Image (cartoon, helix red, strand yellow):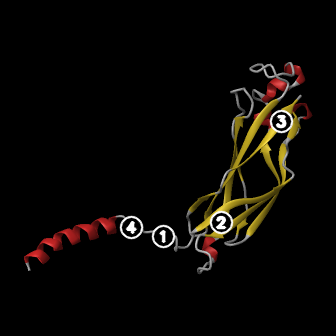
Amino acid sequence: MRKTLRLLPLSLLMLSVALSGCNQRTDKDEGSVILTVSAFDGLPIQVSVNGGSLVQVGELTLTSVAKEPGGVTSSLQDIELQSYEVVFTRADTGTRIPPKKVNGIFGIVPVNGTDTIDNLDVLGADQLANPPLSDLLFQNGGFDTETGSTIVQLNVNLRFFGRTLSGDQISSNTVSWLIEFTQ
């Protein structure tokens, strides 16, 4: 009997610790989906800044996957796209980077389905008007004043944001590729 009385407080303590670690949400709740950039075509890999045009990805596919494959899904797990972000890092010896690009976007990615986006802007006037890309313009000398090069290599890092129809915030994986900017 005494041994049981000693174990009771210890058992209650362990139970309370276990229960405090439980979340209200689990992977089985609505909205338990993963958003991924699953395919893209028409990636720009070399761009002349003196062309003055926006830089776009020709076609991009977003995929929504239920975290519990084979489980029950509902339209509450559909993802409503809200925005995307493009962040740049240098792939060469330079340190200056264009400002990040954040744009709103509309679309629905159904649970266990896809959405295709055509002609997604990944670099616009704000990025072209700032160093190091503005340095490559002929009227500004045509070379990166930091590195002395007529080429700027940037890693482009793209990510999407949205929410499920049940209200869970979702962000995609980050996809990256290299663009070589020339005069």
Which three-letter amino acid code belongs to the residue tagged 4? Cys
Q: Name the residue located 68 percent from the left edge and 67 percent from the top edge.
A: 64
Q: Name the residue located 86 percent from the left edge and 25 percent from the top edge.
A: 137
Residue 88: % across, % down: 71, 38
Q: Which residue is mark 2?
A: 79
Q: Secondary structure at mark 1?
A: loop
Q: Nearer the viewer, residue 179 or 121?
A: 179
How many angstroms separate mark 3 from mark 2 (CA)? 33 Å
Number of other residues with Cα within 10 Å of mark 2, as a class: few under 14, some 14 to 19, many 20 or more: many
Residue 157: % across, % down: 70, 45
Q: Name the residue located 64 percent from the left edge and 76 percent from the top edge.
A: 75
Residue 131: % across, % down: 75, 26
Which three-letter amino acid code belongs to the residue tagged 1? Thr
In the rendered view, would you say 142 is above or below 82?
A: above
Instruction: Please say if the residues under marks 4 and 2 sit with CB atoms less than 8 Å apart.
Output: no
Quadrant of res 89? top right
How many angstroms separate mark 2 from mark 1 (CA)? 18 Å
The tag earlier along the polypeptide, 2 or 1, is: 1
Q: Nearer the viewer, residue 34 or 103?
A: 34
Number of other residues with Cα within 10 Å of mark 3, as a class: few under 14, some 14 to 19, many 20 or more: some
Q: Nearer the viewer, residue 127 or 155?
A: 155
Number of other residues with Cα within 10 Å of mark 1, as a class: few under 14, some 14 to 19, many 20 or more: few
The tag earlier along the polypeptide, 3 or 2, is: 2
Instruction: Please say if the residues under marks 4 and 3 sit with CB atoms less than 8 Å apart.
Output: no
User: Which disc number belongs to residue 180?
Assistant: 3
The tag earlier along the polypeptide, 4 or 3, is: 4
